[in-house]
Amino acid sequence: MSAENRWRVRLRFWLVTLAACAGVLVSGALARWQLARAAQKEALAAEMVVRQGGVPLQGAALAQVLASDPAGPDAQAAFYRPVLLRGHWLPQYTVYLDNRPMDGRRGFFVFTPFQLQGAPATVMVQRGWIPRNFQDRSVLAPVETPAGEVELSGHLAPEPEPVYSLGGDQPGTGFLRIRQNLGLGAFRTETGLPLAALVVVQQGPASDGLLRDWAPVSLGVEKNYGYAFQWFALCGLILGLYVWFQFVRPRRRRA
């Protein structure tokens, strides 16, 4: 083999080596990052269990949390804390979020604003679930809304996550009872209500025609573990291919 060919072989060897090292380092780092994210979510899940067993927020303490920035530390620390509300419903602003399953059945999450007693704040309450009428989507199961002062328990949560919608909701066509998504900021502008940026998920047995068999909050830890496995697998594949093509295969050819 000439000197030029030997130089080319060596250059190719080191270029492939550098590329393989970069691939192993990057994929390994991404796998470790996914594992770290999974650990963070598991810690948050454990913290949520502790929060749910705490003393319910009510009165001035609750009003302070509802007035805080939903992305701020006070609101973040209050997510999934139990609360006790006193006030009255504003049923004229009740909305039904479509495509929200419960126990494998399709239906609606029912949301109604709740005016707090002795405070200007209004909070959106996720009251429960009703099944969908598959013959006519616009026909809604009856939901009772008690009049006057009422008391209810629940826990604080972020605004409902949006679901994919082909058509989407159509603003400017009047107040929509049935919607695909509910953004609290847009709803505040639409109704003029002093709506808090957090939601209360009502707890308790079925009542008012509503079911409340809420599924446990999922933080998607299994996805992080799945991604970590994929990155580790890619890391192993890169390393295996490098060893095969750089060392094993050439030796077998020379044998």
Image (cartoon, rainbow, N blue to C red):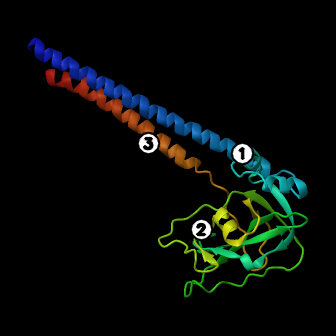
Secondary element under disc 3, as helix, strand or loop, is: helix
* Disc number for residue 230: 3
The Cα atoms of the two marked residues, 3 and 2, are separated by 33 Å
Please tell me whether residue 139 is drawn above or below residue 39 in the rendered image.
Answer: below
Dividing the picture into quadrants, the one containing residue 42 is top right
Q: Is residue 255 visible?
A: no
Please tell me whether residue 26 is drawn above or below residue 144 in the rendered image.
Answer: above
Q: Is residue 125 visible?
A: yes
Name the residue at 58% across, 40% down: 37
Please tell me whether residue 123 is drawn above or below residue 134 in the rendered image.
Answer: above
Q: Amino acid at mark 2?
A: Asn
Residue at the disc numbered 1: 46
- How many other residues sit within 10 Å of disc 2, few (<14), some (14-19) or many (≥20)? many
**45 relative to 249 in the view: left or right:** right
- How many other residues sit within 10 Å of disc 1, few (<14), some (14-19) or many (≥20)? few
Residue at the disc numbered 2: 181
The single residue placed furthest to the left in the displayed view is: 2
For the N terminus, the quadrant is top left
Dividing the picture into quadrants, the one containing residue 233 is top left
Q: Amino acid at mark 3?
A: Gln
- Residue 139: image x %, image y %? 62, 86
The Cα atoms of the two marked residues, 1 and 2, are separated by 29 Å
Name the residue at 48% across, 44% down: 227
Count of picture labels: 3
Q: Amino acid at mark 1?
A: Ala
